[in-house]
Amino acid sequence: MRNAAIRNSVIAATVASAAILTLPPGAAAAATTTDFQVPARYVAGCLSDVFVCFYLPPVTAVTPAATSGTPGTVTFTARQQGRTGSPDCLDVFVNWRNLTTGAVGTTALRAVTPRDSGPPDEWCRYTPSTAVTDSGAVAATADIATAFHVGGYARRVDYQITANPGFGHFPVP
Protein backbone atom coordinates (compact mmCIF):
# COMPACT_ATOMS: atom_id res chain seq x y z
CA MET A 1 0.00 0.00 0.00
CA ARG A 2 2.79 2.41 0.91
CA ASN A 3 4.69 1.72 -2.33
CA ALA A 4 1.54 2.47 -4.36
CA ALA A 5 1.11 5.82 -2.60
CA ILE A 6 4.73 6.78 -3.24
CA ARG A 7 4.45 5.71 -6.90
CA ASN A 8 1.23 7.74 -7.32
CA SER A 9 2.80 10.87 -5.82
CA VAL A 10 5.87 10.52 -8.06
CA ILE A 11 3.59 10.15 -11.11
CA ALA A 12 1.53 13.20 -10.06
CA ALA A 13 4.68 15.28 -9.58
CA THR A 14 6.01 14.22 -12.99
CA VAL A 15 2.72 15.11 -14.71
CA ALA A 16 2.59 18.50 -12.96
CA SER A 17 6.21 19.26 -13.94
CA ALA A 18 5.53 18.31 -17.56
CA ALA A 19 2.41 20.50 -17.62
CA ILE A 20 4.37 23.50 -16.33
CA LEU A 21 7.18 22.97 -18.85
CA THR A 22 4.73 22.80 -21.78
CA LEU A 23 3.00 26.08 -20.91
CA PRO A 24 3.69 28.92 -23.35
CA PRO A 25 5.93 31.73 -22.02
CA GLY A 26 4.04 34.13 -19.75
CA ALA A 27 1.16 31.71 -19.14
CA ALA A 28 2.35 30.89 -15.62
CA ALA A 29 2.12 34.58 -14.66
CA ALA A 30 -1.46 35.06 -15.83
CA ALA A 31 -3.27 37.91 -14.16
CA THR A 32 -5.83 36.94 -11.56
CA THR A 33 -8.68 39.16 -10.42
CA THR A 34 -10.12 38.86 -6.92
CA ASP A 35 -13.31 40.69 -5.92
CA PHE A 36 -13.26 42.03 -2.38
CA GLN A 37 -15.05 39.55 -0.12
CA VAL A 38 -17.03 42.38 1.51
CA PRO A 39 -18.33 45.24 -0.70
CA ALA A 40 -18.17 48.86 0.49
CA ARG A 41 -21.60 50.34 1.27
CA TYR A 42 -22.49 53.99 1.69
CA VAL A 43 -25.35 56.46 1.89
CA ALA A 44 -25.16 59.81 0.07
CA GLY A 45 -27.66 62.59 -0.38
CA CYS A 46 -28.32 66.27 -0.11
CA LEU A 47 -29.39 68.53 2.71
CA SER A 48 -31.93 70.98 1.35
CA ASP A 49 -35.53 71.96 1.68
CA VAL A 50 -35.91 71.82 -2.11
CA PHE A 51 -38.16 68.94 -3.18
CA VAL A 52 -35.60 67.55 -5.64
CA CYS A 53 -33.50 66.58 -2.60
CA PHE A 54 -36.42 65.32 -0.55
CA TYR A 55 -36.03 61.55 -0.52
CA LEU A 56 -34.67 58.79 1.65
CA PRO A 57 -31.20 58.01 0.31
CA PRO A 58 -30.57 54.39 -0.62
CA VAL A 59 -27.64 52.31 0.56
CA THR A 60 -25.27 51.95 -2.38
CA ALA A 61 -22.82 49.05 -2.70
CA VAL A 62 -19.50 49.19 -4.56
CA THR A 63 -17.39 46.07 -5.04
CA PRO A 64 -13.67 46.75 -5.49
CA ALA A 65 -11.46 44.16 -7.17
CA ALA A 66 -7.71 43.56 -7.23
CA THR A 67 -5.91 42.25 -10.31
CA SER A 68 -2.42 40.89 -9.76
CA GLY A 69 -0.23 39.52 -12.52
CA THR A 70 2.90 41.62 -12.66
CA PRO A 71 5.12 40.73 -9.69
CA GLY A 72 4.72 43.18 -6.82
CA THR A 73 1.89 45.25 -8.32
CA VAL A 74 -1.89 45.28 -8.03
CA THR A 75 -4.43 47.14 -10.15
CA PHE A 76 -7.53 48.09 -8.19
CA THR A 77 -10.87 48.57 -9.94
CA ALA A 78 -14.46 48.88 -8.71
CA ARG A 79 -18.01 48.47 -9.93
CA GLN A 80 -21.26 49.68 -8.47
CA GLN A 81 -23.75 46.87 -7.99
CA GLY A 82 -26.61 47.94 -10.25
CA ARG A 83 -28.53 51.19 -10.15
CA THR A 84 -29.76 51.86 -6.64
CA GLY A 85 -32.07 54.77 -7.31
CA SER A 86 -29.37 57.33 -6.60
CA PRO A 87 -27.22 58.98 -9.28
CA ASP A 88 -24.36 59.35 -6.82
CA CYS A 89 -21.08 57.96 -8.07
CA LEU A 90 -18.46 58.77 -5.45
CA ASP A 91 -14.72 58.11 -5.26
CA VAL A 92 -13.61 54.93 -3.49
CA PHE A 93 -10.46 54.93 -1.38
CA VAL A 94 -8.48 51.69 -1.00
CA ASN A 95 -6.08 51.27 1.94
CA TRP A 96 -3.84 48.22 1.55
CA ARG A 97 -1.20 46.44 3.63
CA ASN A 98 1.18 43.71 2.54
CA LEU A 99 1.05 41.23 5.43
CA THR A 100 4.33 39.62 4.33
CA THR A 101 6.56 42.69 3.97
CA GLY A 102 4.68 45.32 5.99
CA ALA A 103 4.38 47.74 3.04
CA VAL A 104 1.30 50.01 3.22
CA GLY A 105 -0.41 52.49 0.95
CA THR A 106 -3.60 54.21 -0.13
CA THR A 107 -5.00 54.72 -3.60
CA ALA A 108 -8.13 56.38 -4.95
CA LEU A 109 -10.51 54.95 -7.52
CA ARG A 110 -11.90 58.11 -9.08
CA ALA A 111 -15.52 58.05 -10.18
CA VAL A 112 -16.27 58.75 -13.83
CA THR A 113 -19.37 60.85 -14.58
CA PRO A 114 -22.33 58.43 -14.52
CA ARG A 115 -24.17 57.52 -17.70
CA ASP A 116 -27.96 57.43 -17.94
CA SER A 117 -28.13 54.67 -20.53
CA GLY A 118 -26.65 51.25 -21.13
CA PRO A 119 -26.49 48.28 -18.78
CA PRO A 120 -27.06 49.19 -15.10
CA ASP A 121 -23.61 47.89 -14.12
CA GLU A 122 -21.98 50.52 -16.36
CA TRP A 123 -23.87 53.59 -15.07
CA CYS A 124 -21.20 54.25 -12.48
CA ARG A 125 -17.60 53.54 -13.54
CA TYR A 126 -14.25 53.99 -11.82
CA THR A 127 -10.77 54.65 -13.18
CA PRO A 128 -8.36 51.82 -12.30
CA SER A 129 -5.41 52.55 -10.05
CA THR A 130 -2.17 50.55 -9.85
CA ALA A 131 -0.26 50.20 -6.59
CA VAL A 132 3.21 48.77 -5.93
CA THR A 133 2.49 46.42 -3.02
CA ASP A 134 5.49 44.08 -3.21
CA SER A 135 4.96 40.32 -3.42
CA GLY A 136 3.10 38.51 -0.67
CA ALA A 137 -0.29 38.34 1.01
CA VAL A 138 -2.15 41.67 0.79
CA ALA A 139 -5.19 42.79 2.78
CA ALA A 140 -7.17 45.89 1.79
CA THR A 141 -10.13 47.96 2.95
CA ALA A 142 -12.22 50.26 0.77
CA ASP A 143 -14.52 53.10 1.77
CA ILE A 144 -16.09 56.37 0.78
CA ALA A 145 -14.60 59.34 2.65
CA THR A 146 -16.94 60.28 5.48
CA ALA A 147 -17.01 64.03 4.96
CA PHE A 148 -19.23 66.75 3.61
CA HIS A 149 -18.77 67.24 -0.10
CA VAL A 150 -20.44 69.85 -2.27
CA GLY A 151 -20.81 69.44 -6.02
CA GLY A 152 -21.83 66.00 -7.20
CA TYR A 153 -22.25 64.94 -10.79
CA ALA A 154 -25.97 65.02 -11.57
CA ARG A 155 -26.92 67.13 -8.57
CA ARG A 156 -25.64 68.50 -5.29
CA VAL A 157 -24.22 65.93 -2.86
CA ASP A 158 -23.98 67.29 0.68
CA TYR A 159 -23.18 64.22 2.71
CA GLN A 160 -21.69 60.79 2.21
CA ILE A 161 -21.52 58.28 5.02
CA THR A 162 -19.79 54.92 4.93
CA ALA A 163 -22.27 52.26 6.08
CA ASN A 164 -19.54 49.62 6.14
CA PRO A 165 -16.09 49.53 4.55
CA GLY A 166 -15.22 46.88 2.00
CA PHE A 167 -12.59 44.26 2.72
CA GLY A 168 -10.52 41.92 0.59
CA HIS A 169 -7.39 39.80 0.80
CA PHE A 170 -5.41 38.29 -2.05
CA PRO A 171 -1.94 37.00 -2.96
CA VAL A 172 0.42 39.09 -5.09
CA PRO A 173 3.10 37.25 -7.07
Image: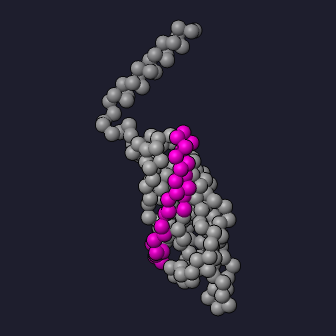
**Residue 39 appears anywhere in the view:** no
Residue 59 occupies quadrant? bottom right
Extreme residue toward the bottom, this view: 50
Q: In the picture shown, does residue 69 fall above or below 121?
A: above
Q: Residue at x 62, y 88 (%)?
A: 52
Q: Nearer the viewer, residue 151 or 64?
A: 151
Q: Nearer the viewer, residue 27 or 69?
A: 69
Q: Residue at x 66, y 84 (%)?
A: 47
Per the image, is 117 magenta? Answer: yes
- Image coordinates of residue 87 in percent, x first then y, are 55, 77
Extreme residue toward the left, this view: 25
Residue 13 occupies quadrant? top left
Which residues fall within the magenta stretch? 93-118
Left or right: 128 in relation to 62 = left
Q: Which of 32 and 12 is in front in this view?
A: 32
- Image coordinates of residue 145 in percent, x first then y, are 60, 67
Per the image, is 62 magenta? Answer: no
